[in-house]
Amino acid sequence: MPEVLDPYEIAKIQLKKALDVLNYPDKESVFNRLSVPERILEVAIPVKMDDGTIKVFTGYRSQHNSARGPYKGGVRYHPNVSKHEVIALSMWMTWKCALADIPYGGGKGGVIVDPRKLSRRELEQLSRGYFRAISRIVGPDIDIPAPDVYTDPQIMAWFFDEYSKLYGYNAFGVVTAKPLELFGSLGRIYSTGYGTAVAAREAAKVAGINLQGATVAIQGYGNAGYYTAKFLHEWGAKIVAVSDTKGTIINRNGLDPDKVNEWKHNKSAKRSVIDYPDAEERKEGDSKYPLFMDVDIVIPAALENQITGENADNVKAKVISEAANGPTTPEADEILNKKGVIICPDFQANAGGVIVSYFEWVQNREGIIWTEEEVRRRLEEKIVNSFHAMYEAKQKYNVDWRTAAYIVAVDRVVKAMRLRGWL
């Protein structure tokens, strides 16, 4: 199998692998039903640019499966967005929501655009135009979008406002990860990192690692990487290395995640961790270095396809908790499983964002506001439960960690489909 495949082909391979283990009598029919989305909408979005010309952008919304509830998933703005990518991402959202045991199916959206090249006015017009174009197939009971790559709470506010104007009421539950002023949820900003940290903590227990003094290396120091480091540090772990696109810093005595983050965003001349003054050692230009250090826990929080069949043998950690999407290739999974590495796969470990999005939706629907402590307690419970459901499936079927997670998620969706008479 090649290292890099069309994402939709990867999604279908992963689904088939889970179905082969579950071995339903009608597994071919189940695969046929689940390997295609229930709906994929392609829209044209005309935008009057600042120079007076009209430019037409292409957008998509894929709705994969609604057996367990409304579709749920982000909208990304990126020049490499494609129909197959959006379909694959919507499939993965189905499994993520099912594994987290929240009442959603999977959806995903995207627009082919580099938003960094747009003015604020152009970005707002694009956002409103996209949501207007998909408005007939979304709604608080139908499909609830959220941010993804290069989208943010401000864009969600425009989505919410455009939908509310179209339908004549304040539809707060139509999107999530809104600004707090528009009844977004407390805890949303750190939800992904918190979930990744909780997953790592649970995996450490299984591996027999005492989190007090456990060594952690983190690849990627954006929002997810920083908050994962912050919470593991608060629980007694030692953050010995972090990296970003400019390289890696190392301190065997431990780094303070808050101080590193403050430096990167407010004091660094390079807008990077690389010139952080308290580093004992620097690996300029080597952002992958943390993945292969002799530490207890590794957190991939950067890009996809970082741990591959070619380098997986170099992994020394006992636990990997994936904050990034798709950082480990299928070939690497096989190698790491043979090495006995515990992997908290992306759609288990980084599900904190969609879980708190669900909490936001519940609060919006009920017209209440939970405390931050309540959000965090409920989030922790969901991540712990999903980890142990995955662990039980791994023991029952003797499979790798990622396949175990797929088995739990796929089986939950299939059971819902059977009860509804869809299979």
Image (cartoon, helix red, strand yellow):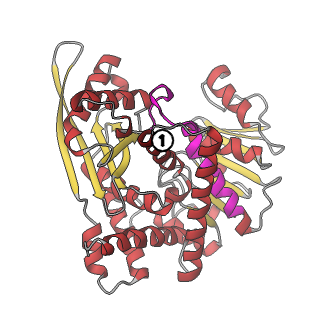
- Tell me, yes or no, whether the highlighted magenta stretch contains residue 399: no
**Screen quadrant of the C terminus:** bottom left
Point 33% across, 48% down: residue: 108
User: Where residue 298 appears, x then y in whole percent?
Assistant: 66, 54
- Total number of numbered labels? 1
Q: Which SS type dominates the magenta stretch?
A: helix
The reply, left or right, for residue 349 in relation to residue 50 is: right
The reply, left or right, for residue 190 in relation to residue 368 is: right
Which one is nearer the viewer's eye here, 111 or 201?
201
User: Where residue 253 appears, x then y in whole percent?
Assistant: 84, 43
Point 45% across, 42% down: residue: 366
User: Where residue 363 appears, x then y in whole percent?
Assistant: 48, 41
Point 22% across, 45% down: residue: 137
Q: Which residue is mark 1?
A: 363
Tell me: residue 184, above or below residue 325. Answer: above
Tell me: residue 51, above or below residue 171. Answer: above
Q: Is residue 6 visible?
A: no
User: Where residue 171 appears, x then y in whole percent?
Assistant: 33, 35
Point 25% across, 72% down: residue: 422
**Screen quadrant of the N terminus:** bottom left
> What's under tag 1, amino acid-wise?
Gln
The reply, left or right, for residue 148 in relation to residue 205 is: left
Magenta segment boundaries in residue numbering:
177-204
Q: Residues within 10 Å of mark 1 (few under 14, many from 20)?
A: some
Which one is nearer the viewer's eye here, 15 or 159?
159
Q: Residue furthest toward the bottom?
A: 25
Which one is nearer the viewer's eye here, 339 or 178?
178
Which one is nearer the viewer's eye here, 101 or 89?
101
